[in-house]
Amino acid sequence: MLKGKHIILGITGSIAAYKAAYLLRLLIKQGAEVQVVMTPAGKEFITPVTLSSLSGKPVVSEFFTANTGEWHSHVDLGLWADAMIIAPATASTIGKMAHGIADNMLVTTYLSCKAPVFVAPAMDLDMYAHPSTRHNLDLLRSYGNHIIEPATGELASHLTGKGRMEEPENIVAVLDRFFERKQSLAGKTVLVTAGPTYEKIDPVRFIGNYSSGKMGFALAEACAEAGAEVVLVAGPVALKTGHPSIRRIDVESAAEMYRAAVEAYDHADAAIMCAAVADYAPETVSDVKLKRSGEERVLRLKPNPDIAAELGHRKRAGQYLVGFALETNDEESNARSKMAKKNLDFIVLNSLRDAGAGFRCDTNKVTVIGREGKPVEIPCKLKTEVAVDIVDLLARCMNEGR
Ligand code: PMT
């Protein structure tokens, strides 16, 4: 997967800088083209000569070459790259990256980089555990960077505790997996529903729910990152979409979401139903604001269409349908009966009894339940990370024809 990829390897001033030479060698062995960018402190730990002979390219660390005055363009470098890896990344560089302090070539290149960025921290355990470092790492995550921490070798979101840099082989494996993922839904079209629906009572009032759309938007983004064309049918939310492969259709009510989703599913290879759709809507909508009266008022509700069930009914051979279940009790059995009733291929269960799961927050904790096999537990982590795991499972099912 790394063959022919352009990679910027950023090296900072840590005792783990020697591992960067191994990492560089592994990347070159895999066929990647690597440009090393070092901070001034990085050069105290490993010589540019070692790195330039391994990469076959002069190391960049200053804005100008001292004797010729040649300008090194961080902008061109940022555009050239398919990925940037900062390994080892010290607390100081992480802090500068988090706050945009562009006082060296490495951080300037990072700020210009359009490609995905991977950060492998390396520092003393106390520095690593310090709230300031944790906060800066969280900031980097929130900018979409991938933090590679030891212990799992995966893109971890929690304090794993070691502070030492991840082993070069594991960093290469993470990168390899990342590029593999980028193609896992290539050529596919995926419909995603997200957010709440609002059911009008009168021109100023509605029945709604707490869904922010964060989980659904993260799924749309993860599908697009995996190479799919995405149709995102979104209820009323305050979120933005920027990915060129996401076509967004904004709707308000369940009836509008139903129409948009049914039409899009016809041309889709899969759908992920993450929206929190109102099950009922007022039977009549007043076209003037209802006035307060001293009397009791009764609001009659009529059932809304079940969008997922309708798509389940229309599902063709080779099409996939994934649902969500938000539960508060008897979680697994409720989720399983929704999966059967709506003819889903698998269902993603989140429970309001779990801390950090469900509506509005940036994290979720879910269990993915399929028709066969054991449920897959995804621990509490960022919704963006949960989305990548769910899309991985979907892509695996689709590519294996399960
Ligand atoms: O948006 P966030 O703040 O990030 O929160 C995420 C979330 C909690 C909304 C999300 O993770 C989630 O659980 N979404 C589904 C919530 C829900 O309404 O579940 P349900 O058990 O009522 O519905 C089961 C499935 O049927 C869902 O896939 C739902 O989209 C679908 N459905 C339900 C009713 C209906 N009329 N039409 C549907 O398509």
Image: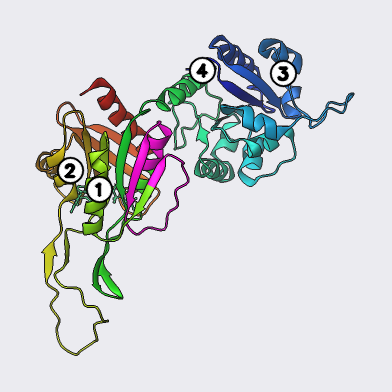
CA gap, disc 4 and disc 2: 38 Å
Q: Earlier in the sequence, mark 2 or mark 3?
A: 3
Q: Residues within 10 Å of mark 2 (few under 14, many from 20)?
A: many
Q: Tell me the mark number nearer the camera, choosing from 2 and 3.
A: 2
Q: Which residue is mark 3?
A: 46
**Image disc number at residue 148:** none
Q: Secondary structure at mark 4?
A: loop
Quarter holding the C terminus is top left
At a point 49% along the width and 23% down the height, the residue shown is 175
Q: Where is residue 205 shown, x and y percent of the image?
A: 28, 73
Q: Under 8 Å from ligand 1: the CB of mark 1?
A: yes
Marks 4,2: beta carbons within 8 A: no
- Dot 4 or dot 2: first in sequence order is 4
**Residue with the mark numbered 2:** 311
Bounds of the magenta span?
219-247
Closest to the observer: 319 or 184?
A: 319
> Is the residue at mark 2 in contact range of ligand 1, meaning its CB lies under 8 Å from it?
yes
The residue that mark 1 highlights is 261
69 to 296, vertically: above or below: above
In contact (CB < 8 Å): disc 1 and disc 4: no
Residue type for callout 1: Ala
Q: Which residue is mark 4?
A: 2
Q: Earlier in the sequence, mark 2 or mark 1?
A: 1
The part of the image, by quadrant, that contains residue 184 is: top left
| Residue drawn at point x = 20 percent, y = 89 percent | 293
